[in-house]
């Protein structure tokens, strides 16, 4: 069922994922927890001079965290064991800025590790190498101190599935910056937790996706040339797409917070991301061959706020409503060359297509098209570049009795897993679906799309030309991305010309405009070249 015999016998395409990378990719989504003095001082970056007495949660309950994450469908948790302020959430013997000096006295790592074990979740840790408190920071001795902290965390709290590093490197209490010994840090993790993946801008196992908005690239290679990057790399924008033919397997992880901030702030209780927004992020991260790392910060009680808990439950319910019912289950699968066709017993209506490669054999697909058979006619409904571990395509509602995946470009014969077809229940209206937008055909043949009253910047329309010039009429300071026909065009609000795009003729095309940072007011999108 997975592929033809010839494909199953195909030689692996190097590089290949390690067993720990394969297991990590299966998780799909992981919770992130920022908790520490910043929770109580109401800042995002602590200065390192905070009195440990400020850390005093009144009703700390790590089991409540674990239950909330499990209810949201998360498979693991990564805790900020030490942020930039240097405060250790465990009683480290290598620092005097820890929970041991606070009124709390407890060991947050042990409590969460125990809670994860009880709830069947994996446990991970984030230690910032930057330390704005430790007196040795900025000297050669600090590298040994930090490696010792890693050893404490990785040998006293059971199995760790992920160790998370960033490249933060500011001044310490002595005004100096540290020259990090990354070889020592990686070697320490490998010695203490050989099954754990290591995250940083440069991997070695998992890379940053290049943004903190929670989405992966339309093109998403799990391969890069690792020696080009270091933690804190200036080339971080390249990490979104990865590199076709890269020599190292380092898949992306998409980090984002459920709130505007990474730590809890009471004035953000009404700004928690909705279940619909979380589903949109999941489809654009896990659904683009990455993993979603969603930060959910505990409040000053030491518990996940009720609003966040409700959002996580709603997120899980939306995913289940769509993805628990595969309409392609039991379909007859056939191969012709590299292309695969599935035929259902009767016509089905769907608006999501899921593709997968067996990445244990390498990542191969570089371009593809999805076609639906309506009666005796095949019609293209989507087009994309990479597939990888998992690719989710949102398409216009389509009724068909067969779906065909045409491989347009590949590095080697593709090894695809069974295709999935899913439908959003009628009662749900999710980001990415077409609102009732205003369409206006101008005298010059251009098509103008105006946002509807709910400001959802997504439209679906029928194209009559295969190539259009895209103009965006917007004001503000945001960087904008226009996703159209499986391509992404980027520019800034105020810059009208975004470039050309190739789109499907005679079939539905979906166009989405997203703000990547900052604010923007969108007035219209114009597609020139639409005249018949």
Image (cartoon, grey):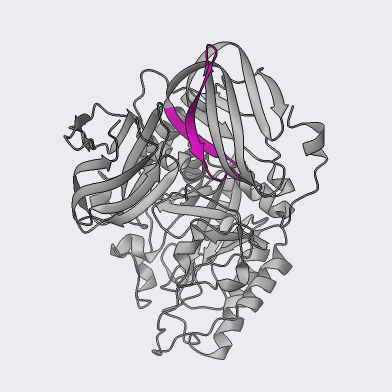
Residue at left offset 64%, top offset 57%: 160
Residue at left offset 47%, top offset 71%: 98
* Segment colored magenta: 374-395
Q: Position of residue 158 (x, y in %)?
A: 67, 56
Specify the quadrant that holds the C terminus. Answer: top left
Q: Dominant secondary structure of the magenta stretch?
A: strand
Give yes or no for residue 389 being in the magenta stretch.
yes
Specify the quadrant that holds the N terminus. Answer: top right
Q: Would you place residue 161 above or below residue 470 in this image?
A: below
Q: Position of residue 405 (x, y in %)?
A: 60, 31
Q: Would you place residue 66 above or below residue 531 in this image?
A: below
Q: Is residue 246 left or right of residue 434?
A: right
Q: Position of residue 474 (x, y in %)?
A: 19, 50
- The answer to whether residue 95 is visible is yes
Q: Position of residue 404 (x, y in %)?
A: 59, 26
Of 130 and 201, nearer the camera is 201
Residue at left offset 49%, top offset 63%: 238
Question: Image quadrant of residue 155?
Answer: bottom right
Q: Is residue 412 left or right of residue 253?
A: right
């Amino acid at each position: 069922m997975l592929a033809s015999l010839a494909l199953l016998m195909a030689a692996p395409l190097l590089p290949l994922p390690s067993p720990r990378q394969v297991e990590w990719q299966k998780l799909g989504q992981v919770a992130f927890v920022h908790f520490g003095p910043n929770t109580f001082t109401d800042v995002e970056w602590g200065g390192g001079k905070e009195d440990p007495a400020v850390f005093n949660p009144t009703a700390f309950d790590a089991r409540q965290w674990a239950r909330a994450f499990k209810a949201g469908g998360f498979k693991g948790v990564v805790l900020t064991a030490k942020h930039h302020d240097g405060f250790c959430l465990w009683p480290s013997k290598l620092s005097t800025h820890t929970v041991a000096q606070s009124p709390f006295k407890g060991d947050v790592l042990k409590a969460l590790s125990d809670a994860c074990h009880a709830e069947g979740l994996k446990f991970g840790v984030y230690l910032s190498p930057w330390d704005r408190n430790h007196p040795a920071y900025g000297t050669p001795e600090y590298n040994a101190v930090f490696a010792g902290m890693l050893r404490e965390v990785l040998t006293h709290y059971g199995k760790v599935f992920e160790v998370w590093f960033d490249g933060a490197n500011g001044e310490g209490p002595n005004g100096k910056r540290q020259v990090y010994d990354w070889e020592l840090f990686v070697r320490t993790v490998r010695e203490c937790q050989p099954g754990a993946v290591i995250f940083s801008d440069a991997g070695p196992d998992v890379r940053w996706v290049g943004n903190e908005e929670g989405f992966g690239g339309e093109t998403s290679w799990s391969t890069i040339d690792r020696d080009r990057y270091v933690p804190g790399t200036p080339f971080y924008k390249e990490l979104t797409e990865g590199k076709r033919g890269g020599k190292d397997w380092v898949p992306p992880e998409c980090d984002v917070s459920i709130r505007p901030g990474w730590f809890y702030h009471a004035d953000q209780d009404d700004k928690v991301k909705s279940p619909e927004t979380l589903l949109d992020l999941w489809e654009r991260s896990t659904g683009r061959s990455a993993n979603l790392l969603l930060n959910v910060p505990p409040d000053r009680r030491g518990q996940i706020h009720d609003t966040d808990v409700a959002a996580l439950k709603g997120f899980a319910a939306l995913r289940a409503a769509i993805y628990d019912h595969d309409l392609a289950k039991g379909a007859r699968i056939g191969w012709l060359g590299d292309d695969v066709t599935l035929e259902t017993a009767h016509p089905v209506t769907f608006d999501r297509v899921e593709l997968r490669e067996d990445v244990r054999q390498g990542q191969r697909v570089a371009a593809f098209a999805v076609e639906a058979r309506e009666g005796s006619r095949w019609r293209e409904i989507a087009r994309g570049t990479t597939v990888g571990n998992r690719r989710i395509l949102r398409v216009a509602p389509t009724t068909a009795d067969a779906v065909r995946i045409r491989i347009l470009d590949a590095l080697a014969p593709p090894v695809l897993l069974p295709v999935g077809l899913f439908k959003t229940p009628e009662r749900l209206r999710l980001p990415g679906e077409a609102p009732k937008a205003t369409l206006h055909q101008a005298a010059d043949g251009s098509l103008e799309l105006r946002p509807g009253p709910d400001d959802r910047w997504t439209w679906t329309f029928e194209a009559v030309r295969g190539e259009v010039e895209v103009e965006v009429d917007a004001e503000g300071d945001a960087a904008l991305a226009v996703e159209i026909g499986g391509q992404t065009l980027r520019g800034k609000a105020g810059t009208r010309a975004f470039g050309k795009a190739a789109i499907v003729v005679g079939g539905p095309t979906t166009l989405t405009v997203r703000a990547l940072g900052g604010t923007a007011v969108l007035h219209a999108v114009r597609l020139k070249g639409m005249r018949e």
